[in-house]
Amino acid sequence: MRRITWLTVAILVVLFALAVGGTPLHWKEVWKGLSTGSPTADSSLFVMLRAPRVLMAAVIGALLAASGTTLQALLRNPLADPYLLGVSGGAAVGAVAGLIMGVAFPAPLAMTGAAISLAVVLFAAREDKTVNITRMVLAGAAVHSLSSAGLTLLLMRMSGRPDAGGLYFWLLGGLTPLPWNTLITLSLMAAVALTALFALSPALNLLTLGPESATALGLPANRVAWTALLFAAMATGLAVTFNGMIPFVGLLVPHAARAWAGADHRRSLPASAALGALLVVAADALARWICAPREIPTGVVTALAGAPFFLVLLYRRRILS
Amino acid sequence: MIHVRNLCFSYNGGFRLEDVSFHLRPAQITALVGPNGSGKSTLLKLLAGILSPTGGEIVAGGDRPSPSHPHPWARRVAWLPQEMDAPPGALVEDTVRLGLFPRSKTWGWRLPGDSEERLARALRVFDLVEFRRKPLARLSGGERRRVLLARALVQGAQAFLLDEPAAHLDPRRHAEVMDVLLRLQREQGILVLMATHDVNLALGFADRVLLLSAGRLVADGPPASVLSHAGLERAYGLPARSVPGIEFFISSKENQP
């Protein structure tokens, strides 16, 4: 019963996301265009704008939530999140630098930026071979500020160029439409990252006990942890390449997924990816709906909804217990 | 049987352990005693395969511990740390189930057929059946220790390495844990090595005591002789004396049926 309810909610959210936007969609016209093979205005809008956008939102949500779940397990810290740790920021610097240099496909640069900022945060937060929670959050804040400053600098240099406004919108997590071939390439890379993280989920269960206990239970903890960190950085880098920075998804969704599916990562990681996908699809739909026909960046919606929710969780101390 | 030969370990240049040799036999409870910083926990971590020795070797049945390939060793040896964190949301069952990992294949995805029976039996042995679906975070220190022991039993290890098994336990819980260890030793021939500051615990339960001092093994023998006044004075640098008329609080081995 619960499963059916969730499935219904998911279908309704996707339908809502497909329907809303600057131009209202007439389903009859869409169907006519798709079924007859001679595109109508509505079916073209559906195929070229709405469908890729919903797919993109779903993939971004899955990537960010899976990355957050992995970081929380590896760092044994419920506050670990690609955005708070400055990983998204590092990825954005990489992606923007690539775009300015005229790189057509900035995903590898974004992933490198993500990996570098994650490495810097972990290095700064290391204390006796473990990661100190306070230092990690502070180091994340520093890296985040640094990357924000870097981004502002890069954007200032760009001012005057015709694509600067679009880039700024992208940076705030505004989902700009991508051509299908780019979208498919990025989605395939996302599938690789998500599959790898899912394959590592039994190992993540052991790593939540800490590297010593994990090694004593037969896991080559260091090697596996670095592999998982690399794929988490890859997931974040890809999500940022799609659409800039979307806060709070990687922080809050893993908590919801654990409450829903339990602490076993074999269940909670796919649950987190699914919930993250649904959440970003919904947030993106709201972003198009709230000020229609104008759009607000999706990242602004997740921050507006996520930040108060996060503060309530902190106040009730649920997040740390 | 675990053979330890000329084991050395140094960390950041300073010596932690120097030339330590001993053998651990099945069905024997051995206490590892020594002052703070004498290398007790380090020795346990070396035996558990968490740390790599800088010299010497540890061998059991042809296997050697290796932090980069720890899977085979984890089927032989279980390590029970002093403190266990409760991962957010983890239930007792989830935690005990992690003990199945050393017997699993394909990165933990394929478990042997008897896994569920093993799990159920370990929960029964340590009286955890009613806690099965309880979050680990809500358990007391003593209950968490039982969860660790159940995990070690699921692991199927023939050697249990315990770091301070008496820490945070009231005398009653302490006695319960020790009773279970004695039962495992008797019924399944489990080898127990426990690092402890509790000299009474070592005297009451151990068949044998290893006394470490500044990274060296200074005595190895039956509890009464190693933990004599002279031995304790030498290791701890403090005069030891007994107080007549005060009985050992917890049930000792002689009282076991």
Image (cartoon, coloured by chain):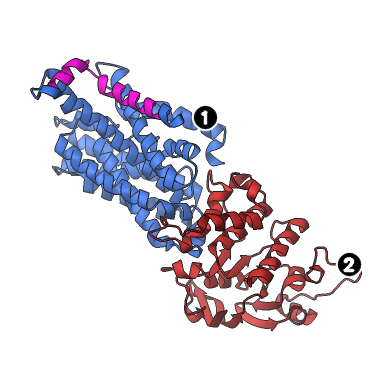
Asked which quadrant contains residue A32, the reply is top left
Residue A13 lies in the magenta stretch: yes
Q: Where's residue B204, x and y in %?
A: 77, 71
Residue drawn at x 48%, y 81% is B55
Along the line of sight, the residue nearer the viewer: B179 or B168: B179
Question: Looking at the colours in the rendered structure, which chain would you say is drawn in blue?
Answer: A
Q: In the rendered view, would you say A227 is above or below B226?
A: above
Residue A245 showing in the rendered view: no
Q: Any idea which chain is the red one in this picture?
A: B
Closer-to-camera residue (B105/B229): B105
What is the span of residues highlighted in magenta in the rendered image?
A: A6-34
Residue A131 in magenta stretch: no
Q: Secondary structure at mark 2?
A: loop
- Read off the residue under disc 2: B246
User: In the image, are marks 2 and 1 on the same chain?
Assistant: no
Neighbour tally class for label 1: few under 14, some 14-19, many 20 plus, Cα within 10 Å: few
The mark found on residue A312 in the picture is: 1
Residue type, mark 2 in image:
Ile
Decide: is A228 above or below A290: below
**Chain ID of residue with mark 1:** A
Which amino acid lies under the numbered mark 1 shown in the image of this protein?
Val
Task: Give the quarter of the figure containing the N terminus of chain B.
Answer: bottom right
Q: Of residues B53 and A220, which is closer to you in this image?
A: A220
Please state the chain letter of the residue tagged with numbered disc 2 in the rendered image. Answer: B
